[in-house]
Image: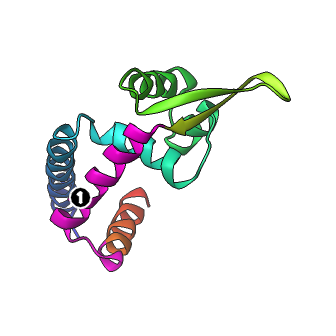
Amino acid sequence: MPDNKRILTISEWYLECQNITTQLNKMSEKHGLSYDQFLVLEQIVELGRNTPGQIAVVFGTSAPAASRKINTLQSKKFIRKIRDMENDQRNVWLEATEEGLRKYKALKKDITKHTGIKATDLEHLRQINQTIIE
């Protein structure tokens, strides 16, 4: 494929991804969250207790950036921080509140209902991403 066609294809892919992100954010905003915040909440709900450091690693971001995301969810009362009083008080665990769990389930239901994305679609996206990286 000529370079200019490849660049155009990558540009089209990028714009389509931006469109998907915009639509996911619109759905999320109806529940008082951004899609990024939903993803952090999902990590906490689905995988149990997480530390702020684990959130930073999973999302490939700095500790301060992860802390900002966590603090936003905490200020909305969707998560709480729990100190490890038994072993080391410096350790902090993140846990979803009842309200956070309700928001998470409601938004997940909306996303599932409106997107219709299948496992094969996700695998295709992974293949496209891998092709772009190479």
Q: Residue furthest bottom?
A: 120
* The quadrant where residue 16 appears: bottom left
Which residue corresponds to the image point at 40% horizontal and 27% vertical from the top-left? 77
Residue drawn at the location 41% of the way across and 46% of the way down: 101
- The residue positioned 27% from the left and 52% from the top of the image is 106
Nearer the observer, 97 or 51:
97
Q: How is the image coloured?
A: rainbow
Give the vertical position of 107 relative to 68 (above or below): below
Amino acid found under the numbered disc labelled 1: Ile
Q: Position of residue 84 (x, y in %)?
A: 75, 28
Q: Nearer the viewer, residue 69 or 8?
A: 69
Q: Is residue 93 left or right of residue 67?
A: right
* Residue 29 placement (x, y as % from top left): 18, 37
What secondary structure do most residues of the magenta stretch adopt?
helix
Q: Nearer the viewer, residue 45 or 23?
A: 45
Q: How far from the left and from the top, in percent, is residue 126?
A: 39, 66
Which contiguous range is marked in magenta?
A: 97-121
Task: Report the quarter where the N terminus lies.
Answer: bottom left
Residue beneath the point at 37% across and 38% down: 99
User: Does the stretch in magenta take in 8?
Assistant: no
How many discs appear?
Answer: 1
In terms of image quadrants, where is residue 132? bottom left
Viewer-side residue, 43 vs 4: 43
Where residue 70 appears, as percent x and y from the top left, is 47, 28
Task: For label 1, count other residues whose C-alpha is less than 10 Å away and answer few (under 14), some (14-19) or many (20+).
Answer: some
What residue would you read off at disc 1? 111
